[in-house]
């Protein structure tokens, strides 16, 4: 890169700072003027929207008070929830309740937000809750065997500049989950991870909740979802594979080489078939598909329609809450076109998240951006939509279609940046 380019980039930053007086009047740190409680309210609401109920056998969740004793195991769930590391790290007010874990230098250390799922559950349930740190799997299993239900909190810390060696939970946590599940009582697994993990224990547990890194009041968010104070309404933003063998790069390039070694990487393995599109193209059945997520109620879909309108594709349908309680549906619209130059069978066109009371219905309308239907001609700098029939797929996940309709679209071109 020419030095003059770097100089210009630095100049643009410094010029803006000087123009706004930041050198003469730097921004003061004013913690006394920060409404931490309101910020935490927002963080909790965001976490509740994003927590995903992956599995719920026989309706073991939500917890409704029928258990007298509940074992809460692992994940430092007695004091907090895990946070991801690196430059996006938000250090909690009062500090981390779990000191001296992970690397001392960047991107560490490992930080936990002081929001205890154990305390949040205890405030909402009449059951006796007993905590075990999970370090001794046999002891944790014995506690589970004497309880009515066990909740295992499993964690995987991720951060920038650190590749995960595989998709397994670290620290023998898979053995812990297997041992607790083998105790013979209902078992719920809460995952605090930043990305997909494999689940060799999945068939032996009753429920799985993907809580991600749930933030400054994550303990309350998890407890409210587990107890059904709010509906489980998150959906997966990434595909969870059965194993690394389903991925474009089962082995990461550069593994085993010295830290400063150079190596070649082929970035064209997937082409445009990234994420769920890779799984579609190669016929892989994932562990959990993109868009997957369960609810504490049920929904039905009807009256699917699609039509070209003002250069876009307009899709409408009816959503009905067919269950016994209020909940949030997350209908997803995918589009498929054969022989269009697409690199994958279908593309996500849009989605909605309506809130419906039990027994009520509503109409959803989704406008699909024309670029979702097009192929980009890089030589001419233009988007091209091929004429012909397109299949519009209404689904609850990338692998769970509920209705389809055909629509004919005319050929169309438009410039980069337009639509």
Image (cartoon, rainbow, N blue to C red):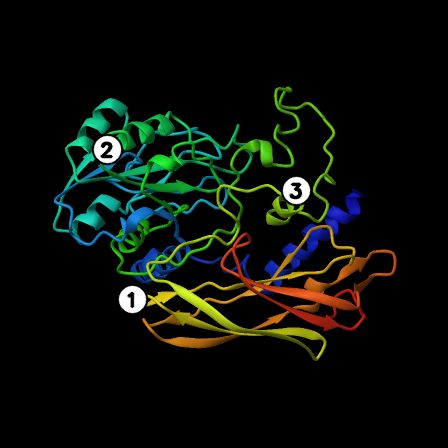
Any mark on residue 325, and which? 1
Identify the residue position indicated by label 3 in the image: 282
Identify the residue position indicated by label 2 in the image: 184
Quadrant where the C terminus is found in the figure: bottom right
Of circles 2 and 1, which is in front? 2
**Are the residues flagged by discs 2 and 1 in contact, CB closer than 8 Å?**
no
Whether residue 301 is visible, yes or no, is yes
Mark 2 / mark 1, whichever is N-terminal: 2
Alpha carbon distance from label 2 to label 1: 30 Å
Q: Is residue 252 left or right of residue 196?
A: right
Q: Is residue 247 left or right of residue 79?
A: right
Label 1: few (<14), some or many (≥20) within 10 Å?
A: some
Q: Name the element at disc 1.
A: loop
Any mark on residue 197, and which? none
The residue positioned 59% from the left and 36% from the top of the image is: 246
Whether residue 30 is visible, yes or no, is no
Q: Name the element at disc 2.
A: loop
Mark 2 / mark 3, whichever is N-terminal: 2
The residue positioned 52% from the left and 48% from the top of the image is: 289
Mark 3 / mark 1, whichever is N-terminal: 3
């Amino acid at each position: 890169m020419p030095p003059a380019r770097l100089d210009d980039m630095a100049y643009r930053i410094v010029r803006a700072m000087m123009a706004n007086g930041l050198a003469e009047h730097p921004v003061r740190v004013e913690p006394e003027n920060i409404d931490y409680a309101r910020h935490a309210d927002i963080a909790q609401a965001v976490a509740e929207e994003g927590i995903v109920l992956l599995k719920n056998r026989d309706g073991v969740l939500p917890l409704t008070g029928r258990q007298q004793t509940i074992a809460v195991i692992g994940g430092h769930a007695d004091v907090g929830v895990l946070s991801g590391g690196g430059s996006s790290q938000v250090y909690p007010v009062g500090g981390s309740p779990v000191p001296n874990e992970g690397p001392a230098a960047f991107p560490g250390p490992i930080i936990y937000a002081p929001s205890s799922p154990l305390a949040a559950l205890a405030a909402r349930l009449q059951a006796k809750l007993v905590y075990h740190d999970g370090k001794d799997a046999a002891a944790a299993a014995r506690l589970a065997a004497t309880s009515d239900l066990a909740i295992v909190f499993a964690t995987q810390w991720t951060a920038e500049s650190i590749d995960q060696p595989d998709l397994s939970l670290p620290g023998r946590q898979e053995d812990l989950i297997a041992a607790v599940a083998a105790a013979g009582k209902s078992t719920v697994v809460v995952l605090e991870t930043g990305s997909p993990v494999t689940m060799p224990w999945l068939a032996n547990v009753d429920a799985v909740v993907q809580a991600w890194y749930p933030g400054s009041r994550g303990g309350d968010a998890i407890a409210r979802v587990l107890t059904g104070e709010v509906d489980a309404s998150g959906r997966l933003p990434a595909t969870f594979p059965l194993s690394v063998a389903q991925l474009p790069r089962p082995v990461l390039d550069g593994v085993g080489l010295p830290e400063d070694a150079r190596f070649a990487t082929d970035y064209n393995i997937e082409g445009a078939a990234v994420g769920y599109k890779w799984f579609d193209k190669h016929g892989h059945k994932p562990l959990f598909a993109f868009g997957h997520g369960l609810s504490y109620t049920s929904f039905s879909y009807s009256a699917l329609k699609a039509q070209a309108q003002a250069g876009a594709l307009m899709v409408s349908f009816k959503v009905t809450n067919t269950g016994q309680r209020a909940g949030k549906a997350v209908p997803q619209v995918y589009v498929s076109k054969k022989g269009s130059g697409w690199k994958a069978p279908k593309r996500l066109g849009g989605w909605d998240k309506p809130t419906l009371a039990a027994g009520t219905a509503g109409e959803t309308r989704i406008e699909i951006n024309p670029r979702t239907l097009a192929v980009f001609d890089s030589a001419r700098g233009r988007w091209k939509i091929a004429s012909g029939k397109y299949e519009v797929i209404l689904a609850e996940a990338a692998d769970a279609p509920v209705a389809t309709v055909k629509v004919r679209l005319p050929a169309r071109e438009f410039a980069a940046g337009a639509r």
